[in-house]
Image (spheres, grey):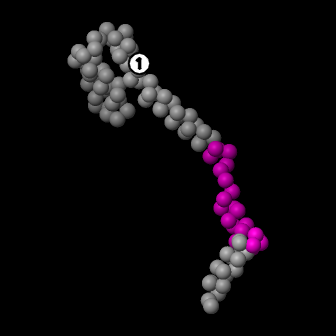
Amino acid sequence: MSTVYKNFIAQKDAACRGRPNEHDSKLDQDRAGLTPLQWLICIVAGIGFAFDLYETLMLPLILRPALADLGNLARGTRAFNLWRACCFSFPARLPAWSRCLAAI
């Protein structure tokens, strides 16, 4: 048997029996976990994702009353449909937003 194969078998045998070997400390260093800064970044990203999800779910509920109150726009008119399209597509398409501003 080759020495590589013997070392592999020895490592597997030690792992099965719960005995530490020379590679365990290297594996523990690789699995050290996240630093506090990395946890903070993950938490802030999670809060941002939650806010984006909330905004996406609330926009269809508040858009019609908001356009009616703030823009004096009636449902079904060309201006209403343009502003509705701009509100839903702003993150994806900036040129649509420029048409909304030009329509003012």
Residue 22 located within the stretch drawn in magenta: yes
Task: Tell me which residue sits at (64%, 79%) in the image.
Answer: 8
Quadrant housing the C terminus: top left
Task: Tell me which residue sits at (37%, 19%) in the image.
Answer: 63
In the current view of this chain or complex, which residue is farthest to the front?
Answer: 16
Give the side of residue 88 with respect to residue 13, left or right. left
Give the side of residue 38 with respect to residue 15, left or right. left
Disc tally is: 1
Quadrant housing the N terminus: bottom right
Name the image quarter holding residue 29. bottom right
Neighbours of disc 1 within 10 Å: few (<14), some (14-19), many (20+): few
Measured from the top left, where is residue 54 in percent x and y? Answer: 48, 28
Give the side of residue 57 with respect to residue 18, left or right. left
- Depth order, front residue of 14/39: 14
Name the image quarter holding residue 9. bottom right
Note whether residue 98 is visible: no
Which residue position is annotated with label 1? 62
Task: Tell me which residue sits at (72%, 68%) in the image.
Answer: 24
- Depth order, front residue of 60/83: 60
Tell me: residue 9, above or below residue 27: below
Tell me: residue 15, above or below residue 69: below
Measured from the top left, where is residue 62 in percent x and y? Answer: 41, 18
Tell me: residue 79, above or below residue 52: above
Q: Amino acid at mark 1?
A: Ile
Task: Tell me which residue sits at (28%, 11%) in the image.
Answer: 74
Over which residues does the magenta segment extend? 17-39
In the current view of this chain or complex, which residue is farthest to the right?
Answer: 19
Measured from the top left, where is residue 86 in percent x and y? Answer: 31, 25
Residue 72 located within the stretch drawn in magenta: no
- Depth order, front residue of 84/101: 84
